[in-house]
Image (tube, helix red, strand yellow):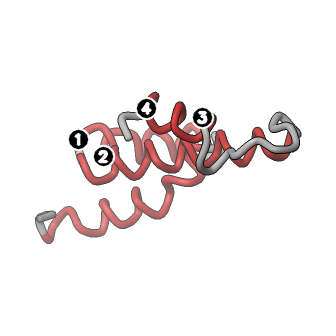
Amino acid sequence: MIASDDSARHEEAWLSLPWLANGRLSQAERDKIEPHVRTCAACREDYAGETVLHQLLSALHRGVFEAGDEPFGGAHFQGGLAQHGG
């Protein structure tokens, strides 16, 4: 359970995870969020998932997957999960 005095910091970090994963936070925002993510197991886990999601969506956008690939159930997805501890 997250201590009540840390709940606002946790919520701010958690809401920022998608932008941390896709590299769109400013350096000042990263400096504020990353220390919390390093010390919060829940945020680290969610950040890992956001990173995998960003990688998959980026690959789809670039057209990396060929017709017939199963990016969300096949080797591409499973490899991404394994890489991030999933």
CA separation in Å, label 2 and label 1: 5 Å
Check disc 1 and report the residue beneath it. Answer: 39
Q: Are marks 3 and 1 in contact (CB under 8 Å)?
A: no
Q: Are marks 2 and 1 in contact (CB under 8 Å)?
A: yes
CA separation in Å, label 3 and label 1: 31 Å
Q: Earlier in the sequence, mark 2 or mark 3?
A: 2
Q: Which mark is residue 75?
A: 3
Q: Nearer the viewer, mark 3 or mark 4?
A: 3
Q: Earlier in the sequence, mark 4 or mark 1?
A: 1
Residue appearing at x 34%, y 47% in the figure: 45
CA separation in Å, label 3 and label 4: 10 Å
Q: Secondary structure at mark 3?
A: helix
Residue 12, percent across and down? 41, 63
Q: Please state, as top left, top right, bottom left or bottom right, where the N terminus lies in the image.
A: bottom left
Check disc 2 and report the residue beneath it. Answer: 36
CA separation in Å, label 4 and label 1: 22 Å
Q: Amino acid at mark 2?
A: His
Q: Nearer the viewer, mark 3 or mark 1?
A: 3
Q: Amino acid at mark 1?
A: Thr
Disc 1 crowd, CA 10 A, few/some/many (<14, 14-19, 20+): few
CA separation in Å, label 2 and label 3: 32 Å
Q: Amino acid at mark 4?
A: Ala
Residue appearing at x 58%, y 41% in the figure: 77
